[in-house]
Amino acid sequence: MNEKIYALLDTAKKTASEMRHAASSVGYLARKEAGKAASNAQLNLQILTKQREIQAAYQELGKLMYDKHSGNAPESDNLMEKLEALDALHLEVAELEKQSGRVFVVKTCPTCGAERKDGDAYCRTCGEKFKAE
Ligand SMILES: [Zn+2]
């Protein structure tokens, strides 16, 4: 599990640095696009980092449960604090995922699947009336 996360993390890092490299060697538009992709890679990296923290928290909690079971739990285990910290991590990941989704989400027509641009009230392809967002 951890190895998989590290591998993904590595890929994300590499992508981010490749994107930055690409951004410095090509024109403005491409730079803008690459910048978007790089910031998305940054977000993915943050998400992976948080997910790693979550995994670590799970492991710690699992050990704590086992220590309780086997009678080796410390007097004060801060269980609630740890669970709340885990809640916070999950919230942060959800927020980051929302941000990263915002970068790449392409809205589409529910009827024909054509791209729906911001502000379109009707589908440019099939004429479907869109519900207000
Ligand atoms: Zn359509």
Image (cartoon, rainbow, N blue to C red):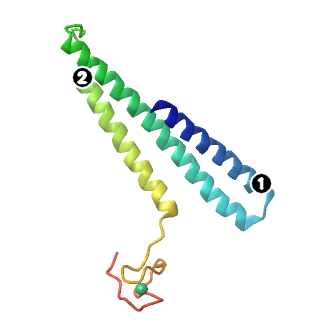
Split into quadrants, the picture shows ligand 1 in the one at: bottom left
Q: Quickly name the residue at label 1.
A: 24
Nearest the eye: 121 or 47: 47
Position of residue 126 measured from the top left corner of the image (x, y, whole percent): 42, 91
Q: For the residue carrying disc 2, how many other residues have a C-alpha within 10 Å: few (<14), some (14-19), or many (20+)?
A: few
Q: Position of residue 36 (x, y in %)?
A: 60, 58
Q: Quadrant of the C terminus?
A: bottom left
Crowding at dot 1, Cα within 10 Å, few <14 / some 14-19 / many 20+, comes out as some
* SS category of the residue bearing label 1: helix
Q: Which mark is residue 61?
A: none
Q: Residue furthest right?
A: 25
Where 103 sits versus 50, above or below? below
Residue type indicated by callout 1:
Ser
Q: CA distance from mark 2 to mark 1?
A: 48 Å
Label 2 sits on residue:
79
The residue under label 2 is which amino acid type? Answer: Leu
Lower sequence index among marks 2 and 1: 1
**Going 77% across and 54% down the picture, which residue do you hit?**
24
